[in-house]
Image (tube, helix red, strand yellow):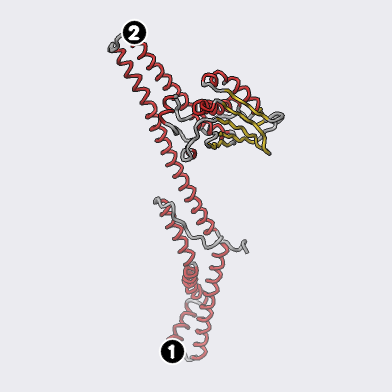
Amino acid sequence: MKRFDTLSWRLAGFGLASLMLTCLILAGAFFGASLLLWLNPSRSFWLVKLIRWTINNIGSLPVLLLAGAPLYVFFFLALTKSTMGYLRSISSGVQNIAGGNLSYRIAVPGTDELGTLADNINKMAVKLKTAMEEERSAAKAKDDLITGVSHDLRTPLTSVLGFLEFVEKDRYADETELRYYVNIAYDKSLALKKLIDDLFEYTRVSSTGLPIRHEPVNLGNLLEQLAEEFVPVLEGAGMTYRIHTGAGPLMIRGDADELVRLYENLFTNAVRYGKEGKILDISVSKRQDKVIGVCTNYGQPIPAEDIPHLFQRFYRVDKSRSRETGGSGLGLAIAKSIAELHSGLITVKSSRKQTEFETVFPAGCPDKE
């Protein structure tokens, strides 16, 4: 039945029905004319005379053809009226969508070509609406990024310019005060460089065109080596680390350099905000087909209302403390982007006892490329 539920078969049916109706009308007219000729053989009735003249001078077949053509067209137009109305409805719907009303939907009463066309137009409208919403979201994200960068660059840059102005105009008492101003300008310049580096890194890893090498990586070994390299930073904050890895290699597939950046950001975040707890706990384990990495610190808890926004660009839980410690508000956003590039996930849980950042990656086989 679906094979015959098409516009072409429907039009063929309308044509056949129009032909049959035309034939019935012509047959009735022919029978009526024949009856008149039989009932009035003397040809006294004017209609009989007209029929006789037409037959003798024009012929029955041409008359039937001349009368049948407009009848056929009339019946065909009458039978296809609903189909033509639906075509006009589709045209009106396309005009509505083209006019910007992307919520408009065309009714889909059947599964023939017109129904398929209407359904495809509806799907196109949905995709177009989604694309426009994504474009608006991207534009807003770009504006937010520019706003955040401008805000974060302005403060240290103003300080640098201010203290350099003191130096330029000799507004210092002695060399000690001069060195003090220069040191402040230098520290603020380092903060600017860190922000610019983080911004570049975020832009790089959040780009869909970033090439990622998918190579076997032993996540346990990677974190053990990275933790050892982080010892001077931990000691500077009065912290130590403990690491727990499962037996055997804990393999994932990814780019080791990018993974190092991810966990460097997590370690740095733990040092910055968890040094009161004195310990950074690192654990790596395998759960079914996933490799789980957890970084735990025992500092102040993250407020529950801040957790959903923690991986957003430039978001700071403690804004004043973040600026004092040189945080750019991009570290966790970078970590999230790197995790997603590896088909992974990063989440956070925080309580009065501890704060855990958990990464989850698909397990990979070391013997496959």
Q: Residue at x 52, y 55 (%)?
A: 119
The x, y position of residue 35, in whole percent, is 52, 87
- Whole-percent x, y for residue 52 in the image: 48, 83
Question: What's the residue at 56%, 28% (across, down)?
Answer: 263
Kind of element beneath mark 1? loop
Label 2, on which residue? 175
- Which residue is label 1 attached to? 45
Q: Nearer the viewer, mark 1 or mark 2?
A: 2
Q: What's under tag 2, amino acid-wise?
A: Glu
For the residue labelled by badge 2, is the local secondary structure a helix, a strand or a loop?
helix
* Residue 333 visible to the viewer: no
Q: Residues within 10 Å of mark 2 (few under 14, many from 20)?
A: few
**x%, y% of residue 174?**
31, 8
Looking at the picture, which amino acid does disc 1 mark? Answer: Phe
The spot of residue 318 in percent (x, y) is: 43, 32
Quadrant where the N terminus is found in the figure: bottom right
Pick the residue in front: 327 or 43.
327
Q: How many marks?
A: 2
In space, the residues marked 1 and 2 are separated at their CA atoms by 135 Å
